Each structure stands twice: as structure tokens, then as C-alpha cells.
């Protein structure tokens, strides 16, 4: 649904777009900064793959707790205040994890749970704002906001690689990141626009926070997002470990492989609007699903590290548009965007809840590198149900 250019003014919408980019970039930067130091945290705590998977589960657990509540929270606070509060909660958790891992696993898990708790509602709120800006501008730009997230992850991964190479302690690195994100993001999101135009949105938000769980289309989009979230999250959590353990590369090279994966995802998301506007959501997603599967096979079974890097590029590009397109599909009706995006994100984040321990336990039995083949099955499922992301009111689009 494309809304007419009334109020807010076009200039305010453009300012809100810039603020939304900063929110996405900050979220990605914070996450990748932590992910870039996972191998060092693992080594200090002497964690086996299955144990590391359970530790990583803490972030997903925090997000899964937060996500079902994010619809009512957004209705009460709005996207601007929700991002402000949750970004501060996330950086607090990052600081706790940065200090806590020096003492043991339990303090680390507590910090990571807070990271996930803040991330869950922050994610829904910035996606609702992104969909609102997208509708106001009349262009399919949601994937570019997610490209901002990916750009933040690339920056976080590259800086993380530099920190590893320079032997900067994990604690100093992550506390520095927490301070930067905790200042920049709350300042930027003051330029967000209202999540809806009038009282109709208030009524929809108050009555729809839980009924969205009964909508078949919303639930199927949630399953679609889960598949792509699993593919993306597995790359985020395990790609550097898989390179280090499977291809026997140094830690710095493993972190650079993570950065290559993120760079490919960023490029795919930046190119996404032109492809989506020209060919439609369904056709584009079906093609890139195949690309992601090919990339996974190349990454897992490649004969050398350069080939594995090529696979990481295809894997990253192929998973780039699934999550943002799912968010746009859930927010097609702006008055129901908050509850629907909350439901979709809640289902999608189950991939982050189940993914780390699944890959960890499979990695314990078959090696982490071989365990990554599990991602392909879910991507095949996503391709089968892609028709549900077709825009509302656009049932006969030829390109789809």
C-alpha cells in the first residue's frame, strides 16, 4: 500500500530515512563487533562446538522473549522511543558480556541475553519505521535499510579483524563499541516520523497485537523469514569458525571470510530495490534462493580457501533479500504493521534460537563445516512458500 505524499513533509521523510539507516547500521555494527570476537571468547573459555552453540543461544533467547511483546510495546511507545530504549539495553548487555566473559560462562550468557532482549524489539521497531518511510517514498527501499545493517556488520567485522590483528583485548574493543552505539543511535532516531497517520492506526494497534497470530499469510511469511534468518544467522555465527576449523586458516583470515560474506549481503541488499521493482518480490526471491544454496555447497565442499571465499560471496548475496522483503510484506498495511511485523520477527527469530545449538551439535558430530549443509533444506522450503510475500492487492502481477 503506497500512501500519498501528505504530511509529514517530504523533507521530514528523507530525514527519517537517514535516521532509519543509522538505526540499522548501529544494530549491525554492534552485532558484528561481538560476532567478530567469538573465536577469542571460545578459546578463552575452552568451549566445544556444542557448548559454544548453547552460549550463542542466549542472544536468540533474549530476542525470542522480547519479540512477542514488541507489538504492544511499539503501540505504547512508538518506534522512536522503542529504538532508543532498546538500543541502550543492548549496549548495556554488550558491556556486561565484555566484562563477564573474563569471569566465566554464566556472566557472558547474562550479558548476551540482554543483548538479545534489546535487539528483538529494536529490530521490529526499526523495520516498522523503515516500512513507513518506504510507503511514504513510494519505492521498494526496505532492502537498502537492511543493506545499512549489513554495512554496519561489515564495518564491525573489519574493525574486529583489525582488533584481533592488533591484539586489542576483547573487553576494551566491545566496551568502546557500546559507548559509540549508545550515543549515536538514540541521537539519530529523534528524526523518526509517526508510525501511522491517525487514530485508525491506534485502534488497529490496540486490537491487532495478538490477533495477527491467527492470520495464515502472516504466519507463512514468518516461516519464510525463519528460513532466511537461519541462513543469515548461521553465516554470522559460524562462518569464521568453519573457516578456521575446516580450512585451517588463521583467526584473522577466518574473520575476513566473515567480512566477505557480509559484504556480499550488503551488495545484494543495495541492488535489491531495482530488482524488486522490476521483477517483483516472488521472482527475485526464488532466484536468489537457488544462488544461496549453490554458495553453501561451494563453501562447504570447496577444495581450497579461495573457493570457500567464493562460496561465501554467493551465500551472502543469495540470502540478502529474504529478511527485508519479509518485513516489507508484513508491513504492507501500515495500520497493522506493528503487530504483523512483531509476529513475523518472532517466528523468524526462532532460527536464531534453534540455529546455534543445531549447528553446534551437528558440528560436534560431523564438523562445523559439514553441519552448514542443514541450511539448504530450509532455503528450499522458503522457495516453496514464496508466493505469500506477493504485495497485498497485487494478486495477478505477471512478473511474480
Image (cartoon, rainbow, N blue to C red):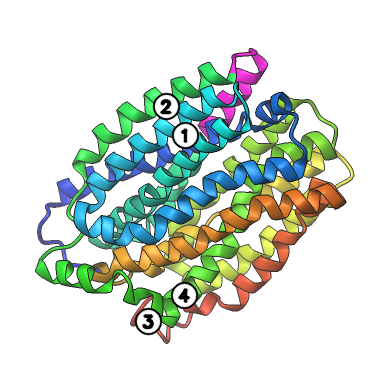
Residue at which label 4 appears: 219
Q: Which residue is mark 3?
A: 394
Q: Residue at x 58, y 34 (%)?
A: 106
Spatial CA distance of label 2 from label 3 is: 43 Å
Q: CA distance from mark 1 to mark 2?
A: 7 Å
Mark 4 or mark 3, which is nearer the start of the sequence? 4
Note whether residue 389 is visible. Answer: no
**Label 2 sits on residue:** 178
Residue ranking furthest to the right: 303
Residue 351 on the magenta segment: no
CA distance separating discs 3 and 1? 37 Å
Q: Residue 109 appears in which quarter of the rendering?
A: top right
Who comes first in sequence, dot 2 or dot 4? 2
Mark number, residue 30: 1
Q: Which residues are magenta?
A: 153-169
Q: Residue at x 50, y 59 (%)?
A: 323
Q: What is the crowding at mark 3: few (fewer than 14 residues within 10 Å), some, or many (at least 20)?
A: few
Which comes before the other along the chain, label 1 or label 2?
Answer: 1
> Residue 304 is drawn in which quadrant?
top right
Q: SS of the residue at dot 3?
A: loop
Secondary element under disc 4, as helix, strand or loop, is helix
Amino acid at each position: 500500500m503506497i500512501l500519498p505524499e501528505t504530511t509529514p513533509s517530504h523533507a521530514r521523510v528523507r530525514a527519517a530515512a537517514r535516521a532509519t539507516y543509522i538505526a540499522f547500521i548501529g544494530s549491525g555494527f554492534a552485532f558484528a563487533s561481538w560476532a567478530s570476537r567469538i573465536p577469542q571468547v571460545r578459546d578463552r573459555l575452552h568451549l566445544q562446538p556444542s557448548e559454544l552453540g548453547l552460549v550463542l543461544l542466549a542472544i536468540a533467547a533474549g530476542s525470542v522473549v522480547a519479540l512477542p511483546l514488541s507489538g504492544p510495546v511499539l503501540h505504547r511507545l512508538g518506534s522512536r522511543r522503542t529504538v532508543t530504549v532498546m538500543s541502550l539495553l543492548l549496549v548495556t548487555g554488550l558491556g556486561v558480556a565484555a566484562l563477564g566473559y573474563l569471569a566465566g560462562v554464566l556472566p557472558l550468557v547474562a550479558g548476551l541475553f540482554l543483548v538479545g532482549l534489546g535487539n528483538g524489539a529494536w529490530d521490529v521497531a526499526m523495520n516498522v519505521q523503515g516500512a513507513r518511510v518506504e510507503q511514504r517514498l513510494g519505492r521498494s527501499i526496505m532492502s537498502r535499510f537492511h543493506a545499512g545493517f549489513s554495512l554496519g556488520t561489515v564495518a564491525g567485522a573489519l574493525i574486529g579483524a583489525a582488533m584481533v590483528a592488533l591484539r586489542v583485548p576483547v573487553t576494551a574493543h566491545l566496551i568502546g563499541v557500546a559507548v559509540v552505539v549508545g550515543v549515536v543511535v538514540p541521537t539519530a532516531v529523534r528524526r523518526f516520523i509517526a508510525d501511522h497517520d491517525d487514530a485508525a492506526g491506534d485502534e488497529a494497534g490496540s486490537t491487532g497485537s495478538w490477533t495477527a497470530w491467527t492470520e495464515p499469510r502472516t504466519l507463512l511469511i514468518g516461516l519464510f523469514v525463519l528460513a532466511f534468518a537461519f541462513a543469515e544467522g548461521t553465516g554470522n555465527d559460524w562462518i569464521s569458525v568453519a573457516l578456521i576449523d575446516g580450512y585451517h586458516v588463521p583467526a584473522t583470515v577466518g574473520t575476513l571470510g566473515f567480512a566477505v560474506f557480509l559484504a556480499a549481503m550488503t551488495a545484494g541488499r543495495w541492488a535489491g530495490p531495482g530488482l524488486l521493482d522490476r521483477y517483483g518480490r516472488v521472482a527475485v526471491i526464488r532466484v536468489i534462493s537457488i544462488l544461496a544454496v549453490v554458495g553453501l555447497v561451494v563453501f562447504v565442499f570447496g577444495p581450497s580457501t579461495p573457493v570457500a571465499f567464493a562460496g561465501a560471496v554467493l551465500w551472502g548475496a543469495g540470502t540478502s533479500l529474504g529478511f527485508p522483503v519479509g518485513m516489507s510484506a508484513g508491513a504492507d498495511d501500515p495500520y497493522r504493521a506493528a503487530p504483523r511485523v512483531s509476529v513475523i520477527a518472532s517466528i523468524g527469530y526462532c532460527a536464531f534460537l534453534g540455529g546455534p545449538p543445531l549447528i553446534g551439535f551437528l558440528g560436534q558430530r560431523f564438523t562445523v563445516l559439514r553441519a552448514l549443509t542443514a541450511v539448504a533444506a530450509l532455503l528450499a522450503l522458503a522457495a516453496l512458500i514464496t508466493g505469500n510475500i506477493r504485495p497485498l492487492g497485487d494478486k495477478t502481477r505477471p512478473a511474480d
